[in-house]
Image (cartoon, helix red, strand yellow):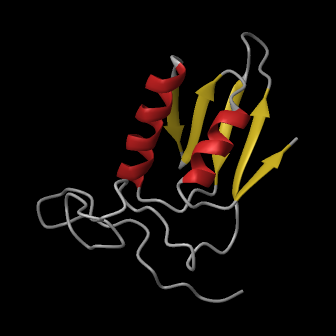
Amino acid sequence: MENDERVVYSSGPDGNMVCPDCRRSPCECPEGLAGAPKKRTQTEPVRISFRRGGKGSGLTLVEKLPMHPAGKEELLKKFKKRLGVGGTVKLGVLELQGDHKAFIKTELEASGYKVKLIG
């Protein structure tokens, strides 16, 4: 496995997060979403899966998303608003209430991500 020295997370002198692509806080990437991948830099696909819980309808999980933490929060906010559901980011994994694999797959592929559905 190659040693990737790209900055994944950093904080600037004012304590705010710095984007690994444009190295600014707040992000000024032209893609529209902070830390959006460039097609040539994404080595493994984003994994989308559905996990059924003991109570409720389950969670759609989005893992291995090569994006700045602020970008993940922004993307989650967009998904929650469009779908009318709750969700959170835990340890870099987006969690959305309900089964929304098809919608998320379509949205991420439209943004240029490689996506793999699990299960």
Residue toward you, 42 or 92: 42
Give the x, y percent position of residue 118.
83, 46
Give the x, y percent position of residue 62.
64, 44
Q: Quadrant of residue 36?
A: bottom left
Q: Residue furthest top?
A: 55
Q: Residue furthest right?
A: 119
Q: Residue at horizontal 69%, vertical 27%?
A: 59
Looking at the image, is 56 positioned above or below residue 31? above
Q: Quadrant of residue 64?
A: bottom right
Q: Residue at horizontal 48%, vertical 85%?
A: 5
Q: Is residue 119 left or right of residue 56?
A: right
Quadrant where the image shows the N terminus: bottom right
Q: Residue furthest front?
A: 110
Looking at the image, is 36 positioned above or below residue 7? above
Residue toward you, 101 or 7: 101
Quadrant where the image shows the C terminus: top right
Q: Is residue 26 left or right of residue 51?
A: left
Give the x, y percent position of residue 101.
72, 35
Total tally of numbered discs in the picture: 0
Q: Residue at horizontal 66%, vertical 75%?
A: 43
Q: Residue furthest bottom?
A: 2
Give the x, y percent position of residue 3.
59, 88
Q: Residue at horizontal 50%, vertical 39%?
A: 89
Q: Is residue 107 left or right of residue 58?
A: left
